[in-house]
């Protein structure tokens, strides 16, 4: 007797988009949000006050504008671990934040779980600072972790005339090309690395170049802002 086996439908792969707003005009930003149907923005930038080219993206002003556009806004950069900018000196190696050490903390894991829960509900975008994700914690830290958890990460990059996306695998290819440009050439004096090891090493080397530097006394400056509250239907966070 033949039996018909009905397989359970596969759950869609959880997906999150990211973008860096440094140098991105605010009108262009909202156009991109509309183009990709973004319904929630999770801001992981380390600073609660934006300067220079990021002035239009000030976390103090974003909640109201997002609410007006029907977008939920959440600022979680107050967690210095998810922002990639820890206060404690122990999380720095050779003067730069160590993303590997940060990723092992409970504080970082709590924010990752927060992101994982959020992306199940609606089309979500992670907001960072740097234009290129390979130079930003959203790519070198958060993107790496989410990829390991089975999330599809699409990093949006704007070139003024167009916007395109690269996934975390493509970001890793960029890291390998940056730090191992001569990998196909034979070297009789060094043991060759496999591609996976090149990726792992690429994350570390790129972090040493672009991670936040250690700045003693930064914790004291931020404590003055810890009691400030921004609230609304779409937002309620303490800095």
Image (cartoon, rainbow, N blue to C red):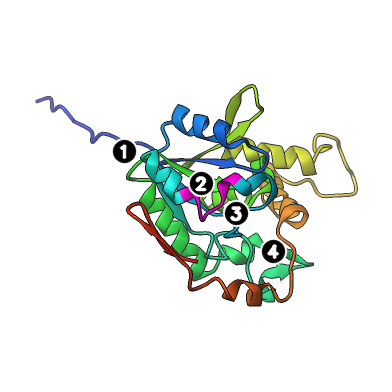
Q: Is residue 45 left or right of residue 17?
A: right
Q: Which residue is mark 3?
A: 141
Residue 232 sits in quarter: bottom left
Circle 3 packing at 10 Å, graded few (<14), some (14-19), many (20+), is: many
Q: Position of residue 213 (x, y in %)?
A: 75, 63
Read off the magenta span.
Answer: 56-62
Structural distance between the alpha carbons of marks 4 and 3: 11 Å
Q: Secondary structure at mark 2?
A: strand
Which callout, 3 or 2, points at the residue further toward the start of the chain? 2
Q: Are marks 1 and 3 in contact (CB under 8 Å)?
A: no
Structural distance between the alpha carbons of marks 1 and 2: 22 Å
Q: Are marks 1 and 4 in contact (CB under 8 Å)?
A: no
Q: Which residue is mark 2?
A: 126
Position of the N terminus by quadrant: top left
Give the camera-side residue of 37 and 208. 37
Which callout, 4 or 3, points at the residue further toward the start of the chain? 4
Q: Secondary structure at mark 4?
A: strand
176 over 221 or under it: above or below:
above
Which callout, 1 or 4, points at the residue further toward the start of the chain? 1
Q: Nearer the viewer, mark 1 or mark 4?
A: 4
Q: Which residue is mark 4?
A: 97
Circle 4 packing at 10 Å, graded few (<14), some (14-19), many (20+), is: many
Structural distance between the alpha carbons of marks 2 and 4: 20 Å
């Amino acid at each position: 007797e033949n039996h018909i086996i009905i397989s359970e439908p596969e759950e869609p792969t959880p997906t999150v988009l990211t973008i860096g707003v440094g140098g991105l005009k605010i009108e262009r930003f909202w156009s991109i949000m509309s183009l990709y149907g973004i319904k929630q923005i999770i801001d992981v930038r380390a600073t609660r006050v934006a300067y220079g080219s990021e002035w239009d993206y000030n976390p103090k002003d974003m909640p109201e504008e997002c609410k007006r556009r029907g977008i939920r806004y959440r600022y979680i950069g107050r967690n210095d671990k998810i922002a990639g900018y820890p206060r404690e000196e122990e999380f720095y190696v050779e003067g730069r934040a160590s993303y590997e050490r940060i990723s092992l903390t409970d504080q970082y894991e709590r924010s990752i779980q927060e992101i994982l829960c959020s992306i199940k509900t609606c089309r979500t975008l992670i907001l960072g600072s740097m234009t290129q994700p390979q130079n930003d914690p959203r790519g070198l830290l958060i993107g790496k972790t989410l990829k390991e958890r089975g999330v599809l990460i699409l990093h949006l990059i704007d070139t003024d005339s167009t916007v395109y996306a690269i996934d975390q695998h493509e970001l890793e290819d960029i890291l390998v090309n940056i730090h191992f440009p001569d990998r196909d050439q034979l070297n009789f004096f060094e043991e060759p690395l496999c591609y996976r090891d090149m990726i792992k090493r690429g994350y570390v080397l790129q972090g040493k170049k672009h991670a936040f530097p250690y700045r003693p006394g930064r914790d004291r400056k931020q404590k003055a802002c810890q009691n400030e509250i921004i609230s609304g239907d779409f937002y309620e966070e303490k800095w």
